Image: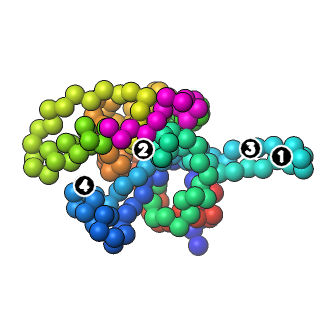
Amino acid sequence: MSEFKLCPGDILVNVNRRQDPFSVVKRWAMNSPYDHIFMYLGKVQIFATLCQREIRIPLLFESFGRGCSLRSLSERYGQEVVILRLKSEHDRERIPYVLWEAIRLASDERARYDYWCIASFIIPRILAQKLHLPLPLKYDRDPFMVCSEAVMEVFLRGRVEILPPDIVPLPEDFLTAPLLDRVYEGTVDELLT
C-alpha cells in the first residue's frame, strides 16, 4: 500500500505501455512512453443543496477532448503515471495562483484543444529531434492548447516558469525540468488522495 498523497499543483504525466499498434508507433516516433499530462487541483468542495451536505471531489485540470477543462481524478484511476512536484518552497507558495489560473483557463470558452499545433509544431519538433536537426519554427502561445501547453500556461500565468515559453512543450519535457522533482511512479488510485 502506498502512503503517498497527491498535493494541489502536482503534475501527473501518463505513461503509455499499451501494445496496440498506434501506441507502439507513437512511442517509437516520440522516443518516449509519456503521452499525456494533467495537473491535480485538490479536493474541491461542492455543496449538495438537496441533502445539505458538503462533498469533496478530487479534480484535475487538463486539455483533453473539447480543450481546457476540470475533470474528476477518478477518470484516471488505474492509469500509470509519474507525479512531479515543485522543488522549491518559494515556488510552492505560488500554487494557489497557479490553481486559480487553471480554473480561469478551464472556464475560458476560447481554450480549445489545439489539433493544429500537433501538425505545425509537435510533429516537426519530433522529426527534428529524430534527425538531430535544429528546429527553425517560431512557436507562439495562444488560447488553443494541447495538454502540455495548458499545464505550462497555468504555471506561467501563476509566475512559475517551469519550462521556457518559446517552445511547444511535450509531456516528457516536464520530467527533465529543473524546478520539478519526481515524487511518485505508479498507478492513480484512491490511495493517492
Q: Quadrant of residue 178?
A: top left
Nearer mark to the viewer, of 3 and 2: 2
* Mark 1, secondary structure of its residue: strand
Q: Label 4, on which residue? A: 30
Three-letter code for the amino acid on which mark 3 is drawn: Gln
The disc at residue 48 is 1
Mark 1 and mark 4 lie on one chain; the one further toward the N terminus is: 4
Three-letter code for the amino acid on which mark 1 is drawn: Ala
Mark 3 and mark 4 lie on one chain; the one further toward the N terminus is: 4
Q: Quadrant of residue 26?
A: bottom left
Alpha carbon distance from label 3 to label 4: 38 Å
* Mark 3, secondary structure of its residue: strand
Above or below residue 156? Residue 83 is: below
Q: Position of residue 89 (x, y in %)?
A: 51, 38
Alpha carbon distance from label 2 to label 4: 15 Å
Residue found 14% across the figure and 51% down from its top: 130
53 is within the stretch colored magenta: no
Q: Label 2, on which residue? A: 147
110 is within the stretch colored magenta: yes
Q: Label 3, on which residue? A: 45
